[in-house]
């Protein structure tokens, strides 16, 4: 296994720039997820690590060696494609063993290697079948088997779970992570699904329009998003946020929304009255208030998921979402009161979209 | 009676005049080819002869040096097919895999060559081949046939090639294959069906070609089949029609069988490329 | 230029550019050149004679007749083909017993060389011994053999008939390709919306099929306009030059009468007609799009 270094990498397609000065490191044995909306460049970056796209400027190192000019086959990486890209005319056995047969390894060795990999992935029974005879999950395993058998320096995953149904996705997610823990493999995983990112990554790289917004462990991104984009992208249901103006009453600064609703601000901020800010708070940190002191809202939609209840409500001119562990007896149209757990509120600058840090 | 059966009867009834018209020449060809000569030119014309005279075929072959015509046709058709494939395969691969400026112009260029038939150019083409010293030379035919078959071959091959996902090739590169190994072990096996179909149709087009052969060849022994048979069929009197039909039969039936077998691939290939 | 040379795609398509340039593009240029010169029987260009070849042609009544006849030929063959091919394609796109067999039969004329089809039809229509006469006499439609190909008008009609038969497979193929690209579910949606069978045909099928009908029309017009073997083999332009179309007459003048310069001039006329047609067609198409 090896570490991967991305150093000031830029990418142009013709005259269009799609990646801007990307720099980060992936440690040996680390599982890093590149996540972002469609078109943010995450797949392009992955393909540049693989050698399937050229590097316009900057440097990529694998295991300490600069690989800019190396062909994919000389980089020692393995890749699992979104469509799996299995060889349709070869059996599962030959698909997995293809890379070994190219190296002219003798047949008995190939056989033992393929069988070992097949056992690991529980596909020993399909070795003689063709890809078209397999289900989505089985194909995915074959694609992984093809990668594993090569004992590569790093694994690259390009949205491998997008083509699976929800239940299968959940199962394969766990399997991929378990495999990673067992093999201690350096992995770069691309997805647009932030849940996959949160559950699988050691560290997440959030990308938008070719630029890296934030890098960090999942919980760090969740608790301390550096800007509104990251705050909105990570976490489901997404963070509540609305604009307001700093107000002062009795030496306490607080936020006043456009409708005049007052939100308390956590301690530690030195802000001037009249300053416009964006207030962000996650749905699980809005609590139902029975003491009569809270903020009014009217229920629009209630979504009971079994383990929790999501309430989408109208607060003045803003729409908010509450994520409650209880099952309140509220119906659409009812009014209720809530209070924010201000320890977990964030403030963002409307101009720069950056999070304002407390002193 | 199910709806399907009712439909089938109506459709067959409506189509039968057309079907009979299409099959009539084949029936005529077959029955005449095996009829004894006397009965063809008899006062009373009948459908079937009194016997099946297979000897007609042998007579025809010997009297008309049929073998040389078969050789010419085979030589030109195989040659044209090989040359066309040799040029079309790389071009189709480039079209389906690479981006390059002028791709649209290139495509239009091919479309235009498809629309210009050799017939209009025959005067100019004749002079070009005279200059190249390829008149009365079967190789001249090979080059000409290939040029006119290229657009069609590239069209068909490219539409099939595009259905082979490039990720499969990329996966093989990552697995350690060189570009060449990837083409040989992964791409080509997947492309074989389209290569077969395209070669067959190019072969048939060349096999049936008439005008260029007639214009460019002078020595009768070099004449390919369509030309030889048309020579046999000229003249108003003393035409050995049973020979002519026997010759046509041999020249056509094998091709028709292969064509019938593969024609639905043609539909698929053309429709993939025709949607523009 | 340098970027072209470095792109591997360029080298891959290069041969496919060179060969047509040699065999197709250069002869076009050459035909134009030869048309304004005196050309020997063996194809050697001698002296420049301006438009003399063209004048000779247009003063030749047979040439003018052939020109007009070519237009009739194209209209009838292409029109007849479209009229037959559209219903045939529609039928073939439905599921019924023996559909595969019917498909194969309809495609058969494509497998046969045009020249050989013409030969077989010529024999079928033979005045004395042909099968058709025999069949018609048998069914009582004729009481004595009819010499079909003796008169130019009759022969021409027969040639049109043969032209239609051999053009049907190609046209049906294109239309079938078009029909197969129409998704099935829009018909179901229309049925739910209350459309009758006829309405579904006129409002859904026809408009969606239009681009394919157009392509088939254009290609057929070009192929039929240029179609040589049928007329040449069946009547060689006779009797009495009565079945000549442009291409057969031009060919005869060039290669049988040795007037290659005139042949070139005639080819230029044909090219100009085709070019005009293409331009007019493209203009109409472009206008339709906007």
Image (cartoon, rainbow, N blue to C red):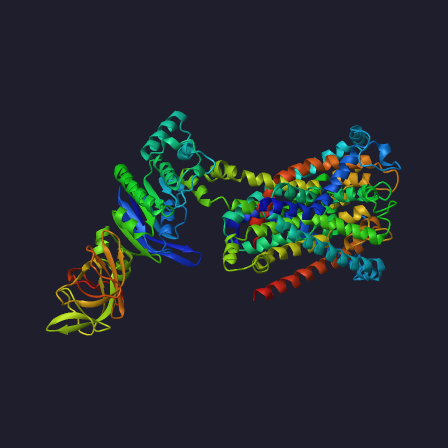
Residue B217 falls left or right of residue C184? right
Vertical arrangement, residue C199 with respect to residue B34, above or below: below
Where is residue B140 shown, x and y percent of the image? 71, 42
Q: Say which residue appears at 79% left-offset and 60% top-offset.
A: C68
Residue A155 falls left or right of residue C233? left
Vertical arrangement, residue C115 with respect to residue A97, above or below: below
Where is residue B263 shown, x and y percent of the image? 62, 42
Vertical arrangement, residue A113 with respect to residue A245, above or below: above
Vertical arrangement, residue C181 with respect to residue C50, above or below: above
Work out whether residue B169 or residue C95 is closer to the camera in this orientation and state it: C95
Where is residue C40 shown, x and y percent of the image? 81, 51
Work out whether residue B77 or residue C226 is closer to the camera in this orientation and state it: C226
Name the quadrant containing residue A4: top left
Quadrant holding the C terminus of chain C:
bottom right
View extreme (left): residue: A250
Asked if residue B43 shows in the view, the reply is yes
Asked if residue B223 shows in the view, the reply is no
Q: Say which residue appears at 70% left-offset and 58% top-offset.
A: C274
Total numbered badges shown on the rendered structure: 0
Where is residue C241 shown, x and y percent of the image? 85, 53
View extreme (front): residue: B1
């Amino acid at each position: 296994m090896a570490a991967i270094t991305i150093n000031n990498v830029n990418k142009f397609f013709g005259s269009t720039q799609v990646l801007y000065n990307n720099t980060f490191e992936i440690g040996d044995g680390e599982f890093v997820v590149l996540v972002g909306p469609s078109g943010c460049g995450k797949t392009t970056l992955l393909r540049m690590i693989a050698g399937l796209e050229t590097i316009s400027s900057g440097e990529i190192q694998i295991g300490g060696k600069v690989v800019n000019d190396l062909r994919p086959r000389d980089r020692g990486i393995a890749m699992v494609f979104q469509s799996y890209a299995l060889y349709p005319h070869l059996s599962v056995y030959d698909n997995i063993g293809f890379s070994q047969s190219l190296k002219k390894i003798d047949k008995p060795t190939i056989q033992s290697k393929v069988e070992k990999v097949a056992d690991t992935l529980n596909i020993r029974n399909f070795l003689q079948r063709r890809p078209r005879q397999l289900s989505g999950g089985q194909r995915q395993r074959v694609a992984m088997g093809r990668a594993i058998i090569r004992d590569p320096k790093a694994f690259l995953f390009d949205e491998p779970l997008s083509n699976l149904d929800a239940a299968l996705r959940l199962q394969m997610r766990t399997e991929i992570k378990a495999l990673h823990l067992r093999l201690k493999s350096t992995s770069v995983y691309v997805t647009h699904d932030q849940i996959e990112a949160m559950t699988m990554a050691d560290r997440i790289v959030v990308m938008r329009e070719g630029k890296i917004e934030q890098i960090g462990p999942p919980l760090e991104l969740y608790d301390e998003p550096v800007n509104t984009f990251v705050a909105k992208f990570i976490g489901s249901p997404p963070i509540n946020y609305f604009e307001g103006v700093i107000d002062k009453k009795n030496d306490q600064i607080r936020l006043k929304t456009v409708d005049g609703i007052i939100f308390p601000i956590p301690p530690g901020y030195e802000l001037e009255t009249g300053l416009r800010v964006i207030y962000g708070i996650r749905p699980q940190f809005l609590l139902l208030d029975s003491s009569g002191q809270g903020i009014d809202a009217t229920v629009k939609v209630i979504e009971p998921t079994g383990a929790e209840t999501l309430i989408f409500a109208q607060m003045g001119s803003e729409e908010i979402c509450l994520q409650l562990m209880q099952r309140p007896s509220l119906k659409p149209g009812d009014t209720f009161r809530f209070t924010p757990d201000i320890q977990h509120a964030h403030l963002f600058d409307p101009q720069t979209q950056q999070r304002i840090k407390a002193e | 009676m199910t709806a399907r059966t009712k439909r089938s009867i109506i459709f067959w009834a409506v189509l039968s005049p057309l079907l009979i018209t299409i099959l009539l020449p084949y029936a005529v060809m077959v029955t005449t080819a095996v009829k004894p000569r006397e009965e063809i030119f008899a006062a009373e014309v009948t459908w079937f002869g009194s016997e099946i005279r297979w000897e007609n075929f042998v007579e025809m072959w010997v009297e008309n040096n049929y073998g040389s015509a078969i050789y010419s046709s085979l030589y030109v058709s195989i040659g044209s097919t090989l040359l066309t494939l040799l040029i079309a395969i790389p071009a189709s691969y480039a079209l389906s895999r690479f981006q390059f400026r002028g791709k649209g112009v290139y495509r239009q260029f091919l479309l235009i060559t498809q629309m210009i038939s050799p017939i209009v150019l025959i005067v100019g083409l004749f002079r070009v081949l005279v200059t190249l010293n390829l008149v009365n030379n079967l190789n001249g035919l090979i080059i000409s046939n290939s040029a006119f078959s290229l657009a069609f071959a590239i069209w068909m091959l490219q539409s099939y090639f595009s259905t082979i996902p490039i990720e499969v090739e990329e996966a093989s590169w990552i697995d350690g294959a060189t570009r060449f190994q990837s083409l040989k072990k992964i791409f080509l096996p997947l492309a074989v069906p389209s290569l077969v179909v395209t070669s067959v149709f190019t072969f048939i087009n060349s096999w049936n070609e008439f005008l260029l052969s007639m214009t460019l060849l002078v020595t009768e022994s070099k004449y390919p089949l369509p030309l030889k048979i048309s020579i046999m069929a000229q003249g108003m009197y003393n035409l050995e029609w049973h020979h002519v039909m026997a010759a046509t039969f041999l020249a056509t039936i094998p091709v028709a069988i292969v064509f019938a077998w593969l024609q639905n691939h043609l539909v698929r290939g053309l429709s993939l490329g025709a949607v523009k | 230029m340098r970027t072209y040379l470095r792109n591997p795609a360029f080298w891959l398509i290069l041969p496919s550019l060179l060969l047509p340039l040699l065999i197709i593009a250069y002869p076009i240029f050459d035909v134009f050149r030869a048309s304004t010169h005196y050309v020997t029987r063996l194809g050697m260009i001698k002296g420049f004679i301006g438009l003399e070849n063209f004048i000779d042609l247009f003063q030749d009544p047979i040439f003018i007749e052939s020109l007009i006849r070519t237009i009739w030929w194209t209209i009838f063959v292409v029109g007849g083909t479209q009229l037959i091919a559209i219903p045939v394609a529609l039928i073939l796109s439905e599921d019924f017993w023996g559909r595969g067999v019917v498909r194969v039969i309809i495609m058969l004329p494509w497998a046969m060389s045009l020249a050989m089809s013409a030969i077989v039809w010529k024999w079928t229509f033979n005045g004395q011994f042909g099968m058709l006469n025999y069949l018609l006499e048998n069914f009582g439609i004729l009481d004595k053999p009819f010499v079909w190909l003796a008169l130019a008008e009759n022969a021409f009609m027969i040639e049109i008939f043969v032209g239609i038969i051999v053009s049907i497979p190609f046209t049906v193929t294109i239309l079938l390709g078009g029909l197969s690209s129409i998704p099935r579910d829009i018909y179901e949606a229309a049925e739910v919306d209350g459309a009758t069978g006829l309405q579904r045909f006129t409002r859904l099928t026809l408009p969606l099929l239009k681009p394919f009908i157009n392509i088939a029309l254009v290609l057929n017009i070009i192929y039929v306009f240029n179609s040589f073997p049928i007329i040449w083999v069946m009547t060689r332009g006779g009797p009495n030059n009565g079945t000549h179309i442009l291409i057969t007459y031009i060919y005869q003048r060039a290669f049988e009468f040795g007037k290659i310069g005139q042949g070139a001039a005639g080819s230029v006329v044909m090219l100009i007609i085709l070019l005009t047609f293409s331009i007019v067609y493209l203009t109409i198409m472009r206008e339709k799009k906007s």
